[in-house]
Amino acid sequence: MTKIAIKCPHCQNDVEVYKSPFLTVDIIIEFEVGIVLIKRKYPPIAWALPGGFVDYGESLEDAAIREAKEETSLDVELKMQFHTYSDPQRDLRSHNVTTVYIASAKGKPKADDDAKEVGVFTNETLPKDLAFDHAQILKDYFKLIRSVAI
């Protein structure tokens, strides 16, 4: 396990702590006849699932609901936890582990927070420029949807 040294804020002595991945959530919001994606305002600028970092003291579920609201203005109801993606290379900015939720939504999608656009897409109309590993996540999702529909 990787350790890093930090200064104790109280005594100023060096303290070793374990360096761990960051927790994130992503939400596949089923809306009308498609899913909601956001166009990111900040690098990497590309289309993405709504999502973000889990705050300290926050559950994954609460983070998913909060991030969906912040980025899309939608009130979501989580239907199920889909999958966790943990490839250390999935986000080149840092080692982020994400848990993906499938949700339904009420309201009108509107880009907010760090989203500059919002859109509703089907498997056939997905944008080519998807951030992180979201192309793989959506491939897995649409495979699940096809298998359930049979």
Image: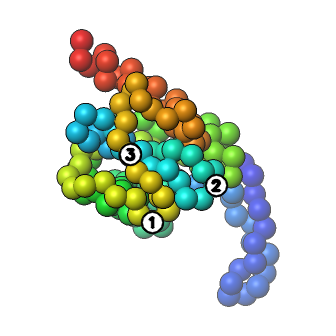
Whole-angstrom CA distance, mark 3 to mark 2, is 19 Å
Q: Which residue in the rendered view is the most extreme toward the left?
A: 106
Tell me if residue 7 comes above or below residue 21 in the rendering: below
Q: Earlier in the sequence, mark 1 or mark 2?
A: 2
Residue 125 visible within the image: yes
User: Mark 1 = which residue?
Assistant: 113
Q: Amino acid at mark 2?
A: Pro
User: Mark 2 = which residue?
Assistant: 43
Q: Amino acid at mark 3?
A: Gly
Kindly state the secondary structure of the residue where label 3 is placed. Answer: strand
Q: Which residue in the rendered view is the most extreme toward the bottom?
A: 10
Whole-angstrom CA distance, mark 1 to mark 2, is 14 Å
In this picture, residue 70 sits left or right of residue 79: right
Residue 1: x %, y % from top left: 72, 48
Residue at 24% of width from left, 17% of height from top?
149
Tell me if residue 62 comes above or below residue 26 in the rendering: below
In the rendering, which numbered label is found on residue 119? 3
Between 81 and 128, the one nearer to me in the picture: 128
Residue 141 visible within the image: no
Closer to the observer: label 3 or label 2? 3
Q: Earlier in the sequence, mark 3 or mark 2?
A: 2
